[in-house]
Image (tube, rainbow, N blue to C red):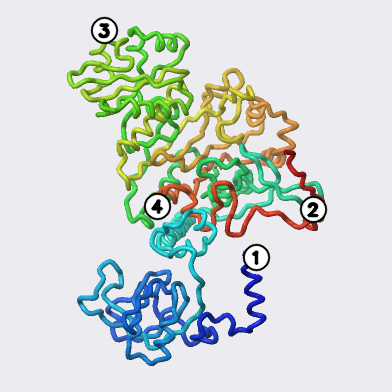
Amino acid sequence: MTNGIFFLCVFAAKTGRKGLSHSGAHDRFPSMEKMKRTHACGELSLSQTEKEVILNGWVHRLRDYGGITFINLRDRSGVVQAVVESDAPAALRERAASLKFEYCVAVRGTVRARPESMRNPEMKTGDLEVKVFDLEILSTCETLPFMIDGESEAKEDARLRYRYLDLRTSAMQDRIRLRHETAFAAREYLVGRGFYEIETPTFIRSTPEGARDFLVPSRVQPGKFYALPQSPQLYKQLLMVSGFERYFQIARCYRDEDSRGDRQPEFTQIDLEMSFVSREDVFEVTEGMMRHIFKKVMKSDLAVPFRRLPYDEAMSRYGSDKPDLRFGLELKDFGAPAAKSDFQVFKTVLAAKGLVKALVAPGCGEYSRKQITDLEETAKTYGAKGLAWMKVTKEGRLEGGVAKFFEKIAAEVVADLAAKPGDLLLFVADKPRTACVALGAVRTRLGADLKLAKPGDFLFAWIVDFPLFEYNEEEKRWDPAHHLFSMPQEKYLDMLESDPGSVKADLYDLVCNGVELASGSIRIHDPKLQARVFAVIGITMAEAERRFGFLLEAFKYGPPPHGGIGIGFDRFITLLVGVATIREVIAFPKNTVGASAMDDCPSSVDEKQLKDLRLMVIEEEK
Ligand code: ASP
């Protein structure tokens, strides 16, 4: 980049303005004064026939047929064909002949119907064209690194390096427009429901919420740091203390996590918080907002209220806290038949208070050994030691895998699992959570392989009654399942210290099609209860004071009961658009290792900058 700019400066200095002209067909870029557009390319119709129009845009496609130049001119609204005919004045024809892809141009001409045989039904403006009698080149374009088309076929590296060009493709234009429309619809709905849009700071005190904070060194106070917020969590709670009652923000959040899967170091969240509410109020507003967004953006009717599924049930039936509910394929408890079988492996697991979970893969009885091994690999990735299997033959007998251990109770097994001839039966026996999660992953995989979910369907559900704490095996301590400020449900208050693992919280997730879209909770607003939760997690009052003292202090001054939710905006758009990664719906994303190839960041900084901040970079020891 730097080189390019440097080159241009030198070039311009040597040759003056003329030097910027590419072909010599024009010696200056004209001002917009006389060529300001009167219409948008994609919005022209035959009703403008005979009208004189001025269009501004980019040369999308270019064809020259013996002196006639066809220019497909594109702006944000779409594409229209402009024609410079062979009888046009020589200067105009010459200028048209000098055009190249993605030159930025202005044309003046008249709208006319295309001859019947030349109409293009694929194009919105395919019935008409603009006969050009004036053409100005507003700027030229160098040889493109890739073609600007519908869906770019260039490698992602190149697309991100030249993102400003990639964003010109119609696929990216559509995605970014849909993102904009969604943000607008969310705002429109929330404002209509009495929410204030309030900005919270991006430089805050470092109060890690689960991930690592990004830090910003202070020059004025050397050795001190701001942090970038992982979410506006504490500030939105403070806004409730301040009496704003209903807050929202389309907020940027920052988490310094290792690059893994589909993550971005910065992402966007529709963040909201409400006072004097129970979880049902948060659900009702979120459902209303989703319905409004679907109506405005997707032009469809989203049924509300969404289904509610307790966490325990979701884990037991689907082996996931974000199940794809577009298909059934439920996990079943196989404890009773397993106990009656001759299969010692299952019996040992049951004796150790584990679970045997079963899944019926419909019509997969013909699966090859390799296909079954692939499914087993999926189960193993999620902690299972193996995946047991057997097939139901056409005659309804059990065959293959572990079938021999179930010979005596074959009929019972088939009936218990409601299995049909030609089905494949799959089992994981393990600790309860592992058995569910591992077989749940197999369920997800089968759902995709068998194409069980109808594309274009959106099935939302609330997962409710999450545990308040999760046990951290490595650190041998309880961690908050969400964040530190979620409210334990009243009926579990007595067990907070004695049995933390069984405490359910007023904590909820919104899921859709197997994707976790949002998390939220009713918050603790009682400092004494907050202190008890800190104690279970092992945070001393002194540490709590140091990290969140300002929030705890605010809670001494009449905090209202409150709760809210944060909706992952990028992920939501990814789901609406139906693309594989959130990078496809962010204008300028980082790549999979958190870098931007376009502006080459993160980058080194000048010695002077480091000195001003009194920072030193220590080279990693090899
Ligand atoms: N701050 C939470 C999050 O980022 C959302 C919430 O509880 O409102 O997940």
Ligand 1, what quadrant?
Answer: top right
Inspect this view and state whether residue 240 appears.
no
- The answer to whether mark 3 is within 8 Å of ligand 1 is no
Whole-Å distance between the Cαs marked 3 and 2?
A: 76 Å
Residue at the left extreme of this rendering = 395
As drawn, 147 above or below 16: above
Q: Quadrant of the N terminus?
A: bottom right
Mark toward the start of the polypeptide (2 vs 1): 1
Label 2: few (<14), some (14–19) or many (≥20) C-alpha neighbours in 10 Å: some
Q: Which residue is mark 1?
A: 2
Which numbered disc, 2 or 1, marks the residue closer to the eye?
1
Question: In the rendering, which numbered label is found on residue 577?
Answer: 4
Question: In the rendering, which numbered label is found on residue 408?
Answer: 3
Whole-Å distance between the Cαs marked 3 and 4?
A: 51 Å
SS at circle 1: helix
- Asked if the residue under mark 4 is in contact with the one under mark 3, i.e. CB atoms within 8 Å, the reply is no
- Asked if the residue under mark 1 is in contact with the one under mark 3, i.e. CB atoms within 8 Å, the reply is no
| Residue 551 coordinates in the image, percent (x, y) | 68, 41
Question: What amino acid does circle 4 point to?
Answer: Val
SS at circle 4: helix
Question: What amino acid does circle 1 point to?
Answer: Thr
Mark toward the start of the polypeptide (1 vs 4): 1
As drawn, 168 above or below 513: below
- Identify the image quadrant of residue 512: top left
| Residue 342 coordinates in the image, percent (x, y) | 34, 7
| Residue 622 coordinates in the image, percent (x, y) | 72, 38
Whole-Å distance between the Cαs marked 3 and 1?
A: 76 Å
Residue in the picture at 41% in, 82% down: 97
Whole-Å distance between the Cαs marked 1 and 4?
A: 35 Å
Question: What amino acid does circle 2 point to?
Answer: Leu
Question: In the rendering, which numbered label is found on residue 613?
Answer: 2
